[in-house]
Image (cartoon, rainbow, N blue to C red):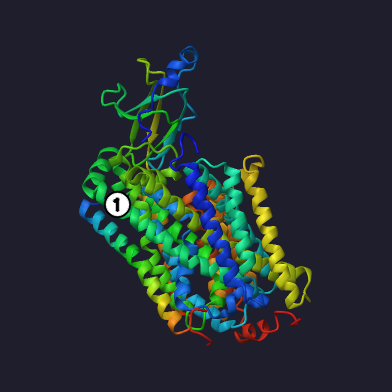
Amino acid sequence: MTGLDDPILPTSIAWGLLAAFSVLWVVLGWWLGRRNKTAEDHMLAGRNVGLALATATAMATWVTANTTMTAPQLALQLGVWGMLGYSLGALGLILFAPLARRIRELMPRGFTSGDFIRLRFGTFTWRVFLVVSLIYAFGWLVSMAMAGGVLINALAGIDYRVGMTVILTVCVIYTLLGGLRAVIGTDFIQTIIIIAGAAFIAWLTIDKVGFEAIHFNLMEERPELLSLLFPAAIMFLFNNLLFGVGEIFHSNVWWSRAFAFGRNVGFRAYLFGGLLWLSIPIVAGFIALATPALGINVPAADMVGPLVAAEVLGLTGAIVVFIVVFAALASSLDSLLAATSDLVTRDIYRGHIRPRASEQHQFRATKVIVVLLGLLTWLAASYRGEIPIVGSLAELLYFTGAFVASAIWPIVAGLYWKQANPQGAAWSMILGSGIGLASYFLIGFYVAALVGAAVSLAVMVLATWLAPRPFDWDRLAREDTHAMGSPA
Amino acid sequence: MRILRPLLPALLFLPLAVGAQPAFDAPPERSTDGGFTLAWEADAAVVLEQASGPDHADARVIYQGGDTSTVISGLPDGEYRFRLRAADADDWADQTTVTVEHHSLTRAFGFFAVGAIVFLVLIGAILRGRPRD
Amino acid sequence: MTISTTALSIIVVIATLVATLTPILLIALFIRDWKKGRLW
């Protein structure tokens, strides 16, 4: 981190916390997964997850390290609108609620988002979708592993590569041992840690600094942050919302949960999770607005959260932040590892390499693929800066906004429009990504997702209007029952 | 926390420090969102001042200490002048000017409107969706 | 147009209250699911 000259948490305490929580997650993962017998158990936790665990896992997964770090960063850079705009990311979860119900009705035996696109739109669209999906998933994985290393380094002075390796290894081990059950079970505890920790820091900041001082000092030093007509923040609002919707609608992380949640649970879990999530970016973000009142220097925008917490709370604050960040990282990293390995197993390995793989075979393949994904992520994250394109992967994630937002309409049309045109779905992703990407370079990062979503909507509507292709919804349920290969 | 760091290192390396004045490291020239990061090269603690007039009349110290960067944000339209000196020196060593010109509100609300339309169509499509017809 | 101290404090306090109650709500849901044997 530029300019941050000493860590806010003593290294010995950080190692103690890291070790204690690593052991906790691995033991829990093993314990939760000990009864997994089939690939279906491992990938979808028995398809009957209840409301409490379902709500918590939706929230925890959507609170990434990005949320705990980016919410304060956006409050610092885009002010009140930045903070509120980030909290609208919750709409992705809320809008996915009806989709989750529909998905489970249409495909009671489905496995991945790739399954749906293949059955609904055919092979060509499926392949385009897999490219979009895997670029995003890998970008997210690597950027989270990197964020883990950077944060641990900045908070505690532990070497970047060591911290990154520890976090990644722990997540790979417990995902490997327990599959989705381990992911969801640990998510529950992680959600509680993250939210309680963020609320604790927020209360103490309110108590020690106070709104009067925050408001007064902002007006003096950074007045635009309080402005309700801050142009960049106004542009950012819907872009962020559509980025979030795109991330959730297309990604197998959320689809595998829709398949795994019990009947009638998905809708309520995503709705509750989303409504409760609304508060998190405000709680985690507003503390950054206290920076002028506290008179602290912020050397790098993404470190503002930990800096304020440590200033207000001293050592306790640093410890709470460290635990919250570790929980936030783990809860997203594990979900992404599990869901991406499912997608690779189902749609690449079984779909493209060994179509006749037996269930036992796929069970083993899923595990091998988790390890391979972990290794690949580790390689990309450890050589950041040395390979040019990987060095900027964190920024790369920003322009995946164009890709994911252009997948919104193929998903929505596929689920709801009987006449949706399959070629149109493929081209709406291709053109949406392309033009969205161009606008990223021509205008700025805050419009890429917006343009991607707008273009893909236009293409999808036009194609379906000009060349409607009626679809028999029952085909989805009929064909996905045969999709899992022969039982071993 | 680390606002006022001891000047000991600067004194120890005094002969070296004389040759290396603090200097801004690739400062931005303009900003469309009122925010940017200022970074500098320095061997020891520095003093950073911000002013909005050409003669530094309203200058105030915005940072003093051993960090080598600072995040500025929330500035309204205007020309801002920053200058930098070593904490133990009297003369300013480097200065830079950043112009803040926010996007026009017309442009901002244009994108806002496109976003709002896409979003409303999305809500409509989901609400209208009837299972199995 | 600037947000007032009151409006800012209302937004933040409500959000923080919700965030404080969320873990309690989740644990209550967990206990309910557990008693009914509907955790998984």
User: With A106 as the anchor, is B23 left or right in this view?
Assistant: left
Which of the pair A368/A14 is nearer the observer?
A14
Residue A219 locus on image (x, y percent): 25, 42
Q: Chain of mark 1?
A: A
Q: Can you say whether A342 is above or below A50 in the image? A: above
Whole-percent x and y of residue A148? 54, 50
Decide: is C11 above or below B96: below
Residue in the image at 31% along x and 60% along y: C16
Q: Is residue A130 left or right of residue A458?
A: right
Tell me the crowding category of disc 1: few under 14, some 14 to 19, or many 20 or more residues within 10 angstroms, Cα based. some
Label 1: element kind: helix
Image spot of residue B96 (x, y percent): 41, 26
The image position of residue A440, as x and y in percent, is 53, 49
What residue would you read off at disc 1?
Answer: A204
Q: Is residue A443 visible?
A: no
Kind of residue at badge 1:
Leu
Q: Is residue A14 left or right of residue A282?
A: right
| Res. A324 image quadrant | bottom left
The one of A224 and A302 positioned closer to us in this rendering: A302
**Any part of residue B36 in sight:** yes
Q: Quadrant of the C terminus of chain A?
A: bottom right
- Quadrant position of residue A301: top left
- Quarter holding residue A173: bottom right
- Marker count (numbered): 1
From the viewer's perspective, is B74 left or right of A426? left
Q: Residue, x 59% and y 81% (percent of image)?
A: A107
- The correct choice, above or below, for C12 with respect to A78 in the image is below
